[in-house]
Amino acid sequence: MPIPTPARLVVLVSGSGTNLQALIDATSDPAYGARIVAVGADRDGIEGLARAERAGIPTFVKKVGQFSSREHWDRAMADTVAGFEPDLVVSAGFMKLAGESFLERFGGRFVNTHPALLPSFPGMHGAADALEHGVKVTGATLFVVDAGVDTGPILAQAVVPVEDDDTVESLHERIKVAEREMLVECVGRMAREGYTITGRKVRFGAPVH
């Protein structure tokens, strides 16, 4: 899909916001082709929100516990994000799964990263599961979010070797470095070039009409 330039990004965070910071730094260059119009979170008092505020970016918080059901929270998140008219929504360490309402509004425009080479080792413990399995390489995956857990069409992958003396922490740190670089590069390409999704295949470049 072609995207207007600069593309409007809404970034969702749950923690320290290192991926968010990488995107803030990248979008400071007009040539990047995108700007962050809002940062949302599911909790207060996190460094990710502070990073956005220091950069002068509007923020919002929607806690699941503030709503009578997970579905109501999901709908409120979707409504709030939609108010910022994003071209892309980026999960940058956002620890909540999107529900039906959110995906109805932003399906095909919502991307997330995972610290493993999907479809291997989905779920919450990608680095630990890869290490325990004894694989020689793992890495990070950028994918278009769908209704499953880490099952959407894959945009990009970065390979990280597993060292013999790796701990979960050391491996995860190296994965996070590769993940940030991949996220910044690919979101920029999505913004500048557009992209197409055909079945499970995603390609950069808007369709030719």
Image (cartoon, grey):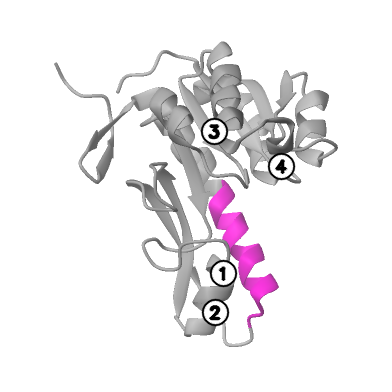
Disc number for residue 160 = none
| Residue at (56, 18) in percent of width and height | 79
Quick check: marks 4 and 3 in contact, CB under 8 Å?
no
Q: Badge 1, how many Cα within 10 Å: few under 14, some, many 20+? A: many
Relative to residue 90, is residue 130 depicted above or below? below
Quarter that holds the N terminus: top left
Residue 3 placement, left or right of 45: left
Query: Alpha-carbon distance for marks 1 and 3?
Result: 30 Å
Disc number for residue 17 = 4
Residue 176: image location, x then y, percent:
61, 57
Identify the residue position indicated by label 1 in the image: 127
Q: Does residue 191 appear in the picture of this structure?
A: no
From which residue to which does the magenta span run?
166-180
Looking at marks 1 and 3 on the same chain, the residue that comes earlier in the sequence is marked by 3
| Residue at (42, 63) in percent of width and height | 117
Looking at marks 2 and 3 on the same chain, the residue that comes earlier in the sequence is marked by 3
Q: Badge 2, how many Cα within 10 Å: few under 14, some, many 20+? A: many
